[in-house]
Image (cartoon, helix red, strand yellow):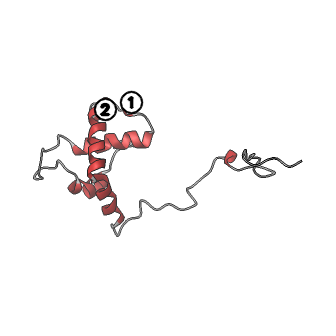
Amino acid sequence: MKRHELSGLQWRKIKGFLPGRPGSVGVTAKDNRNFVNGVLWVLRSGAEWQNLPAGYGKWKSVHKRFTRWAKGGVWERIFQMLLGDPDNTYIMIDSTIVRAHQQAACGKGGVKTRLWAVPEED
């Protein structure tokens, strides 16, 4: 399994909620798992869609399908299903994993922002 791709367990949890699966209404997708892995690659890497590796399909087709699924609420249904999972330990976020860059703090002396609409005092 590659770093950006779904594990077998993750795939089994969501595959029944995706359009294009065999037996569902509409066209059967060629490979939903490869498509989802391509979307995850873009989202996790922060790359632009145009830089999607060819193994995931044509970037424009993947992007178009991603957009259709977003408009159709597919991603929302997946997230809602995952939120309702009683074994949901994989989306917990607490302050131990949230870090700010050392320069994110204002530094000594507080903020030195000048309010442009307010006249300065002498």
Looking at numbered disc 1 in the image, what kind of residue is underneath it?
Answer: Asn
Task: Give whichever of 71, 98 is nearer the camera.
Answer: 71
> In the current view of this chain or complex, which residue is farthest to the bottom?
86
Residue at 54% across, 62% down: 94
Residue at 16% across, 50% down: 21
Task: Give whichever of 91, 26 is nearer the camera.
Answer: 26
Residue 65 lies, in percent from the top left, at: 26, 41
Measured Cα–Cα span from mark 2 to mark 1? 8 Å
Q: Secondary structure at mark 2?
A: helix
> In the current view of this chain or complex, which residue is farthest to the right?
122
How packed mark 2 is, by other alpha carbons closer than 10 Å (few <14, some 14-19, many 20 or more), is: many
Task: Give whichever of 91, 12 is nearer the camera.
Answer: 91
Residue 10 lies, in percent from the top left, at: 31, 54
Q: Do the residues under discs 2 and 1 have CB atoms within 8 angstroms?
A: yes
Which numbered disc, 2 or 1, marks the residue that appears first in the sequence? 1
The residue singled out by tag 1 in the image is 51
Looking at numbered disc 2 in the image, what kind of residue is underneath it?
Answer: Trp
Question: Vertically, is 67 above or below 17?
Answer: above
Residue 15 in the figure: left or right of residue 37: left
Residue 107 in the figure: left or right of residue 11: right
- Which quarter of the rendering shows the N terminus? top left
Task: Give whichever of 12, 74 is nearer the camera.
Answer: 74
Q: Secondary structure at mark 1?
A: helix
Residue 24 lies, in percent from the top left, at: 12, 53
Which labelled disc corresponds to residue 59?
Answer: 2
